[in-house]
Image: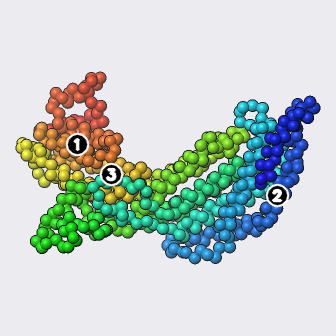
Amino acid sequence: MNLLENISVMLMQHGPLILKHYNATFTEPLSYVVAKIQGEIDSQVGLIADTFYDVRRFPKVIQDISLYTFPHLRHRQEPHHEPQFQDSADIVNLIEIGDLMNELATILHQWSLYCRFVAVKYFSTSTESPLVPEIIQKSNFTAKVTSKLLPAFESLCSFYFRRSLEKALTIEELPSLDPLLRATHVSVSPEQVPCSSVIEDITIVLNNTLQNVLDSAHPSAVKKFIGVCFEVIQRDLVNGFFIKSINENQPRYNSSLVLVTASDTSNVTSPGASRSGTPAPEGLGFFKGASSALGNVVGTGAVVTTASANPERLKNFVLYLNTVAVGQEYFNKIITKLADSSFLSKAFPFGSDNEKVASILKTDFLDPFNTISHKIIQDSLVNLYNQSFKSKLLVMVNECFPEVNETNYVVYSANILNDTSSLVRFASSWQATIRPYKQTFHKNLVYQKLVKLLVVNLANLLELKFLAVLRKFKINELGSLKLEKDLSSIINEVCEDSYELREKFVRVTQLVLLVGMDDEEYELSIKEGEDDGINWVLTPLERKQGRGYRI
């Protein structure tokens, strides 16, 4: 469609000549000339478009794609589907559909550029967004675009997107988590989040297809494609892939990820072996084991294993949960980039079309997808907590604050006050529990939500535990001081990556503060309007009960 570009260049070059010969006769000579030649432009451009439409056999292509039933996607909706990879007998070639879509998008884009050129150059009377000139509205080629080319383009885009998703599902690949589950001195989130290849493939398709739709400069095409696109994503990607894959890989009770030593996954010489690689002398087995254990505790703070005991179901669960998060991240980047006002104002220059398109992209696609993906992640993390973390947190809290006797609560010895053995065990257990997920989960959209969920539940467990032991044993001044130190250490440990999470411990912190106050301090703390007053979240009844636990 270089014809439209050549016409625009000719009008620009002949502008001075037109003004010279027609200025005395017509008030708007350039607009008059453009209006006079528009009929011939419609005729020539329409002839090219009709020839292209017939040569590419668009009616046959449209019929073929309307008959395609998406067997793999339908098969995935069945309760117990088996993977199918027979994908070579397609009656529709996806590459050819993509080429046709790109060619048709180019025609529509060139026409939109010509319309904008004519409107801005010859028919715009203000600096505001121009309106579509009447000669363009009544143009024969505009009618042809609306009735013939645009419907074909919309059908191609819709089919191409869904068929590409189906193709991506048939060639899905999952990366291995094992390289990320190695014990390291510093535990960090992965730079490249491990996830299914499906989300990477469909992200590229979405970006390219949506770019073509926006280049067509027709808000109606954007509206229709976004509607069809989101329907496909909700039915085939979210329900048929995300949720189904996560449900099929739900973690079993008490299963968890563990870190493995580097020696188990590589040929690195162990600390107990000689430099030449010969076996360590007999009799040094204990020192070799002790050295490894010390390196694990000091270097990583987490318990590691020399054999990969990570269940495949749980590893797949992590991968598919990451896939949802990566999809949310990628889709947000695409829509944010394409919904940029500077880009849309060029693609949709007429009236408020750019604002309408931006609203369509956000309200009809991005916002509902973010809502759905957020719910999937949150529900999956709650299930992961119940299956893998809940019992571990209970054990950690019970070991740190035992109910066997009152030794840790009615304290008379400095040795007991300064005893940190239970805190060391808690820190080691916490790191062993959380680090494998830190090294594998998407940092912002999954891992931080997991930590928040754990912290909220840990705060509740600690409050219940403290109330139970205080009712049973009560507490003295040194005991309250030890309890405050222990709680502070736990909060520092679990909130090391997010200071804001400390506010989740405000109730249990105030409970410990309450039992550590003498009567005078407590009276000062409840005075309203005083500088040294405390903003209590505990109710007066809860504070009264808490004061009763102090000996």
Determine the CA span between mark 1 and mark 3.
Answer: 17 Å
Find residue 117 and name its label. Answer: none
- Pick out the residue farthest to the right: 25
Name which quarter of the figure residue 518 lies in.
top left
As shown in the figure, which amino acid type bears the numbered disc 1? Answer: Ser
* Quadrant of the frame with the N terminus: bottom right
- Cβ atoms under marks 1 and 3 closer than 8 Å: no
Q: Which mark is residue 488?
A: 1
Identify the mark nearer the N-term, 1 or 3: 3
Label 2 residue SS: helix
**Could you tell me the amino acid type at mark 3?**
Leu
Q: Position of residue 392 (x, y in %)?
A: 27, 58
Question: Can the viewer see residue 535?
Answer: yes
* Residue 233 in sight here: no
| Residue at 80% in and 49% down | 6
Q: Quadrant of residue 357?
A: top right
Q: Give residue 454's mark.
A: 3
Question: Toward the viewer: 87 or 391?
Answer: 87
Residue 450: image x %, image y %? 37, 52
Indicate the position of residue 80 as horizontal and vertical percent values. 49, 73
Image coords of residue 364 (percent x, y): 60, 49
Which of pointers 2 and 3 lies earlier in the amino acid sequence? 2
The residue indicated by pointer 2 is 48
Q: Quadrant of the C terminus?
A: top left
